[in-house]
Image (cartoon, coloured by chain):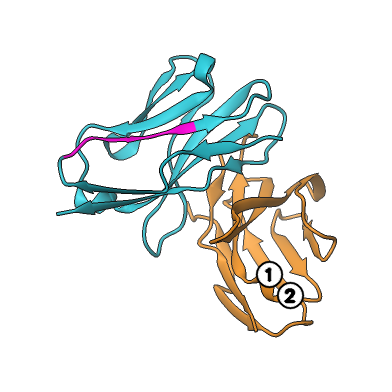
Chain colours: A cyan, B orange
């Protein structure tokens, strides 16, 4: 079955700390990978996406993610978090030919000032 | 360009009733997908419509149905509501087959 695993359910960081959120997906062929963010009271927004090419992708607000095909991973990183990064982060995948997004369970990030 | 809009934003229903939720995609987007978000199950795919045809369906009972109109607007219907149907229902639209843009959702509470 297609699935996405996010290893950290809750993460608490201080401002300026570095962030890395893990994401692994089950094998199912060619994939497209996404990280979405849901700020408190707001709707899901796309942070970044990987379709093909350079496995290191940069997104909005200083976030980046690296696709490692051999590890079926797509980890999200940010060198220095801000209080405004407090949100829930979702990793998601679509398998080529299908529009269905398969989401991970999400990681709640709390950044303390 | 206006984003994805969903109406209503909040709904309260009782068990056994039925409900219809509406989604207007971004102008020009022909694909509309629906997702259910709950604390226990997370985000789960319901179905996808493209050019008025259901192209993909998730693992939900037949009480969940949808349709898409010629202007790409979509509705989803849940009949015989159960307590477990309480959730945030999200609609997403896309131009290409990959990147989806989400609306604010409809929060359904079943009492």
Q: Residue at x 82, y 48 (%)?
A: B53
Callout 2 touching callout 1 (CB < 8 Å)? yes
The reply to whether residue B28 is visible in this rendering is: no
Residue identified by numbered label 1: B85
Query: Looking at the picture, does residue A42 appear above or below residue A16?
Result: below
Disc 2 to disc 1, C-alpha distance? 5 Å
Which element type, helix, strand or loop, lies under badge 1?
A: helix
Q: Position of residue A63 (x, y in %)?
A: 32, 34
Q: Quadrant of residue B25?
A: bottom right
Q: Alpha-carbon neighbours of circle 1 within 10 Å: few (<14), some, or many (≥20)?
A: some
Where is the C terminus of chain A found, in terms of image quarters?
A: bottom left
Residue closest to the eye, B43 or B48: B43
Q: Position of residue A73 (x, y in %)?
A: 49, 25
Q: Position of residue B111 (x, y in %)?
A: 65, 84
Does residue A96 appear left or right of residue A32 in this picture? right
Which element type, helix, strand or loop, lies under badge 2?
A: loop
Query: In the drawing, what numbered circle is on residue B82?
Result: 2
Span shown in magenta: A17-23
């Amino acid at each position: 079955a297609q699935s996405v695993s996010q290893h950290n359910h809750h993460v608490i960081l201080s401002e300026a700390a570095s962030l890395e959120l893990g994401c692994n997906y089950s094998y199912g062929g060619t994939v497209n990978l996404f990280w979405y963010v849901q700020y408190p009271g707001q709707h899901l927004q796309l942070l970044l996406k990987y379709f093909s090419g350079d496995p290191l992708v940069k997104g909005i607000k200083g976030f980046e993610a690296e696709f490692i095909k051999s590890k079926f991973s797509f980890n999200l990183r940010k060198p220095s978090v801000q209080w405004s990064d407090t949100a829930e982060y979702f990793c998601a995948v679509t398998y080529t030919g299908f529009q269905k997004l398969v989401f991970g369970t999400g990681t709640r990030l709390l950044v303390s000032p | 360009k206006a984003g994805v809009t969903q109406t209503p934003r909040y709904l309260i229903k009782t068990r056994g009733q039925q409900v219809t939720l509406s989604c207007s995609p971004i102008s020009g987007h022909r694909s509309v997908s629906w997702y259910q978000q709950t604390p226990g199950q997370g985000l789960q795919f319901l179905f996808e419509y493209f050019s008025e045809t259901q192209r993909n369906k998730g693992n939900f009972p037949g009480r969940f149905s949808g349709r898409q109109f010629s202007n790409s607007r979509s509705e989803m219907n849940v009949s015989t509501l159960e307590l477990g149907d309480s959730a945030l229902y999200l609609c997403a639209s896309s131009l290409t087959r990959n990147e989806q843009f989400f609306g604010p959702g409809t929060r359904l509470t079943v009492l």
